[in-house]
Image (cartoon, rainbow, N blue to C red):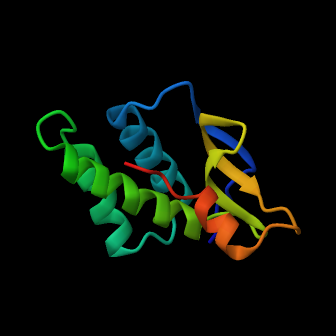
Amino acid sequence: MTTRKASIGTISHGTMRTEDLLRTFARELEWLSHTDRTRAESDLIAEADAADAEVRPNEADEILSELFDALNEHAPEGCVFGAHEGDGSDFGFWPVDDDNSEEEAFTRNSYDF
């Protein structure tokens, strides 16, 4: 069984629309977890695909937050999933500087809905 690894860099750029992020993040999680997907990951992907951010924005934001957490679990060693510190619309896997504390790294992968 081959495990897919996340690549350092961008998976979504230029949009902050919840609908776009849900779709992109769900596809990335689907790709990364293809051979060893947990039931929770499968359920999360299905929820993201079914979410309607315009009708239920709070629910969509919660799913997006869960996707952040799930993708962060697949981050390469020494990296976090989140927005690039120089461009808030550039989401991907980014190295954590040795100078950064764990708290700063957590802040970097958080998204304020």
Residue 68 in the image, given as x and y percentages of width and height: 48, 58
Count of numbered badges drawn on the protein = 0
Q: Nearer the viewer, residue 111 or 21?
A: 111
The quarter of the displayed image where residue 107 is located = bottom right
Residue extending furthest right?
98
Quadrant, the N terminus = bottom right
From the viewer's perspective, tell me whether residue 101 is left or right of residue 60.
right
Residue 76 in the image, given as x and y percentages of width and height: 73, 64
From the viewer's perspective, tell me whether residue 13 is left or right of residue 25.
right
Q: Residue at x 32, y 74 (%)?
A: 39
Q: Residue at x 38, y 62 (%)?
A: 66
Q: Is residue 10 above or below residue 81?
A: above
Q: Nearer the viewer, residue 67 or 98?
A: 98
Residue 87 in the image, given as x and y percentages of width and height: 66, 34
Q: Residue at x 78, y 62 (%)?
A: 96
Q: Is residue 75 above or below residue 47?
A: below
